[in-house]
Image: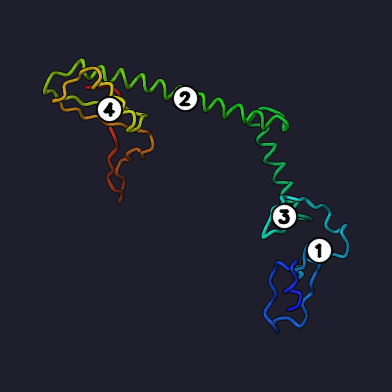
C-alpha cells in the first residue's frame, strides 16, 4: 500500500497502518489508483443507471462527479415533482420553462428600471413642492412610504435646485416596507412602536 501511495496516479489517502488487515486498491491504468471505498455490486446491472454530473480538473487530473442507482432514481423523482409544479406555476410546457423564466426576469428588470425612473420624477416633484411652499426659517415635515434613504437624497437635490430656503428646517422620513408593523401589547407582551404612514407633506 505504501508503494502504491508513491505512484503518480495515486490521488487519495490510505488508512493508518494496522487499521485494516488488508486494503484493496483499484486502478484505472494510467488514470487513477485509489483505495476501494465500496459499495460492491455483483454486476453493473445492479447500478440500474449512472449519471455523470460534472467533470473538473484537480491537481492536473480529471475528477468525475456522478450519481447512480437508488440515489439517482430518488433525485429524478424529486426533479419530476418540481418540474410538474413549475409547469403549473409558469403555465407552459417543460421545454418552455427556461425561456419563460428568462422572459419573466427581463420583465422584472424592465419594471425595476421604470419604477426607479418614476421614483426620481416623484422625488423631483416632492422637492419642488417643498421649496415652493416653505418660507425662510420655516419648518416642514414629509414622510414617504415605500422608499429608501436614497429617495430622500433625491428630494433634497431637487429642493436645492428649486431654490428652497437654506435656513428652513426639513424633517424628511421614509419607510421602505421592511419594518415589522407595531402589534398591540397583549397579556405579558411588550409595547412596540411603528412608523407613521402619512404620505403627504405637511
Picture quadrant of residue 41: bottom right
Whole-number angstrom distance, CA of label 4 to CA of label 2: 23 Å
Between the C-alphas of marks 4 and 1, the distance is 72 Å
Is residue 61 positioned above or below 155 on the image? below
Q: Is residue 57 above or below residue 137?
A: below
Q: Secondary structure at mark 2?
A: helix
CA separation, marks 4 and 3? 56 Å
Local packing at callout 1 (Cα closer than 10 Å; few below 14, some 14-19, many 20+) is few
- Residue 54 in percent (x, y) is at 71, 50
> Which residue lies under the disc numbered 2?
113
As drawn, the label of residue 30 is 1
Few, some or many C-alpha atoms within 10 Å of disc 3 (few <14, some 14-19, many ≥20)? Answer: few
Real-space CA distance between mark 2 and mark 1, rounded to the nearest whole angstrom:
56 Å
Mark 1–mark 3 distance (CA, rounded to whole Å): 19 Å
Mark 3 or mark 2: whose residue is earlier in sequence: 3
**Answer yes or no: do the residues labelled 4 and 2 have beta carbons within 8 Å?**
no
* Residue 131 % position (x, y): 21, 18
Q: Which residue is mark 4?
A: 143
Mark positioned earlier in the residue sequence (1 or 3): 1
User: Looking at the picture, does residue 121 appear above or below residue 101?
Assistant: above
Reading the chain from its start, which is encountered first: label 4 or label 3? Answer: 3
- In this view, which residue lies farthest toward the top? 132
Residue drawn at 66 percent across, 29 percent down: 99
User: In this figure, which residue is indicated by the disc labeled 3?
Assistant: 65
Identity of the residue drawn at 70% across and 84% down: 18
Whether residue 63 sits left or right of residue 127 in the image: it is: right
- Pair 4/2: label in front: 2
Amino acid at each position: 500500500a505504501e508503494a502504491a501511495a508513491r505512484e503518480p496516479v495515486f490521488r487519495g489517502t490510505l488508512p493508518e497502518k494496522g487499521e485494516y488487515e488488508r486494503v484493496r486498491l483499484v486502478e484505472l491504468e494510467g488514470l487513477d489508483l485509489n483505495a476501494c471505498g465500496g459499495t460492491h455490486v455483483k454486476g453493473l446491472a445492479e447500478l440500474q443507471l449512472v449519471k455523470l454530473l460534472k467533470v473538473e480538473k484537480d491537481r492536473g487530473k480529471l475528477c468525475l462527479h456522478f450519481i447512480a442507482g437508488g440515489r439517482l432514481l430518488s433525485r429524478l423523482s424529486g426533479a419530476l415533482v418540481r418540474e410538474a409544479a413549475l409547469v403549473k406555476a409558469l403555465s407552459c410546457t417543460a421545454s418552455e420553462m427556461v425561456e419563460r423564466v428568462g422572459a419573466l426576469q427581463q420583465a422584472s428588470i424592465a419594471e425595476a428600471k421604470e419604477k426607479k425612473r418614476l421614483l426620481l420624477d416623484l422625488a423631483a416633484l416632492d422637492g419642488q413642492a417643498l421649496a415652493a411652499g416653505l418660507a425662510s426659517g420655516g419648518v416642514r415635515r414629509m414622510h414617504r412610504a415605500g422608499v429608501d434613504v436614497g429617495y430622500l437624497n433625491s428630494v433634497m437635490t431637487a429642493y436645492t435646485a428649486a431654490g428652497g430656503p437654506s435656513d428652513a428646517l426639513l424633517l424628511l422620513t421614509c419607510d421602505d416596507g421592511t419594518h415589522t408593523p407595531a402589534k398591540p401589547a397583549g397579556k405579558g407582551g411588550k409595547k412596540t412602536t411603528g412608523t407613521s404612514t402619512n404620505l403627504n407633506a405637511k
